[in-house]
Image (cartoon, helix red, strand yellow):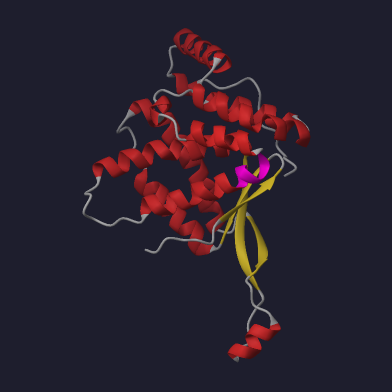
Amino acid sequence: MGISLKLFIQLIWPGIRTIGDYNDFEQLYEAIHHILTEEGEDMEIERSRLRLLGFCYDLRHALMGDRDYEYVDNGLNDHIMQQLGIVGLKKNLYLSFPTFYPEMIFVTFALNYFISLYEAKRKKSAWDSNPGIVGNFQNAVLACLKETLTPQKFVNTIRLLNSNPSILKNYMTQYIDLLNLRFLEWDPIKREQNISIFVKRIVEKGTEYCQIEREILQAAYKYQCHPSEIRLNEEYPEHIDW
């Protein structure tokens, strides 16, 4: 399997749109599934694994035709086609779907952990395209961040996203839902101003995260259930104007 180079990321408010052709999405879907641990293999990162499977859910439904599509210029024009002696389309059909900005930041960061686990387990002598395909997707997300952030904020963001991914152990992913909903409520200017702050909060698990974690653990103890079964009081709106 070759590494796709066509997949790209487009900034939309309140999120990021993943765009690619059928092969791009299929390769990324398969690659992420290859690098993820098996169900129940490591319960400390199970919640993060499920979050990544949520992203794969959108990839899969895009492949099934249940998400958006658009036509993208493929570089051909009348002059090139005349020189080549061919007749063809000037646009290619690309699949696409949106993801909340905080969600995409978490997905990008979490993939680092699973890539490191995957590469530690596989035979070094065997060539494997899966980490490269996932890395290509991560690079596309970073390219989008670079266009949005100031140079210094982008450098800080890269540093945070490349920090110790073991912070994912026992991560309360309900916190990502909280950030998604907060991001949705803000106007575009406030969203853009807070992107680097969200990266810091997601990766460093600051004061607010710790408060949410305590509340989740207390609720889980009270209701005698696993922390992953605790949900926020807030709900995502039925319709989101992407």
Pick whichever, 94 or 230, lies toward us. Answer: 94
Assign the C terminus to one quadrant of the image.
Answer: top right
Residue 166 visible in the shown view: yes
Specify the quadrant of the image occupied by residue 145.
top right
Tell me residue 68's x, y (percent).
65, 55
Which span is picked out in magenta? 144-149
- Above-or-below relation of 76 to 189: below
Spot the residue most to the front.
152
Residue 38 visible in the shown view: no
Spot the residue most to the bottom.
85
- Above-or-below relation of 127 to 145: below
Q: Which residue is drawn at the image coordinates 50% and 23% (left, top)?
A: 204
Q: Which residue is drawn at the image coordinates 55% and 44% (left, top)?
A: 142
- Above-or-below relation of 207 to 54: above
Q: Is residue 145 magenta?
A: yes
Q: Is residue 60 magenta?
A: no
Pick whichever, 33 or 6, lies toward us. Answer: 6
Pick whichever, 173 or 1, lies toward us. Answer: 1
Tell me residue 229's x, y (percent).
48, 22
Assign the N terminus to one quadrant of the image.
Answer: bottom left
Tell me residue 241's x, y (percent).
75, 42
- Above-or-below relation of 171 to 145: above
Secondary structure mainly formed by the magenta segment: helix
Specify the quadrant of the image occupied by residue 171.
top left
Q: Which residue is drawn at the image coordinates 63% and 20% (left, top)?
A: 233
Tell me residue 69's x, y (percent).
65, 60
